Image (cartoon, helix red, strand yellow):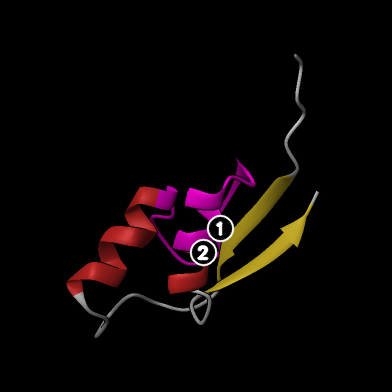
Amino acid sequence: MDKVMAKVRVTQVKSTIDRSVRQKATMEALGLKKMNHTVEHEATPQILGMINKVNHLVKVENI
């Protein structure tokens, strides 16, 4: 029952200044706080959906 999920590395490449409150909240939920900040998440449907909503602000790499 040990399912190993794929991981993704998400890096913020654009600022959240002048973005909607919803996009800012999504970035915070992903754990991104400032420019060039990088976090790693498991590639669950929820995380991939959040990444898709702010894909113009982040860079995504598969691990």
Residue 20 bears which disc, if any? none
What percent of the width, then of the height, locates residue 51? 51, 64
Residue at the left extreme of this rendering: 21
Q: Quadrant of residue 62?
A: bottom right
Residue 18 figure quarter: bottom left
Check if residue 1 falls in the magenta segment: no
The extreme front residue here reads 1
Is 43 situated left or right of 29 in this image?
right
Pick the residue in front: 18 or 8: 8
In the image: residue 24, left or right of residue 3? left
Number of numbered markers: 2
- The quarter of the picture where residue 11 lies is bottom right
Q: Are marks 1 and 2 in contact (CB under 8 Å)?
A: yes
- Residue type indicated by callout 1: Leu
Region of the chain picked out in magenta, as a range: 30-50
- Gap in angstroms between the C-alphas marked 1 and 2: 5 Å
Please report the residue visible at 28 percent of the width from the left and 80 percent of the height from the top: 17
Q: Front-most of 19 and 48?
A: 48
Q: Is residue 24 left or right of residue 1?
A: left
Name the residue tied to disc 2: 51
Residue shown at the point (44%, 54%) measured from the top left = 32
**Which quadrant: the N terminus?**
top right
Question: What residue sits right under mark 1 in the picture?
Answer: 48
Residue pictured at 51% horizontal, 70% vertical: 52
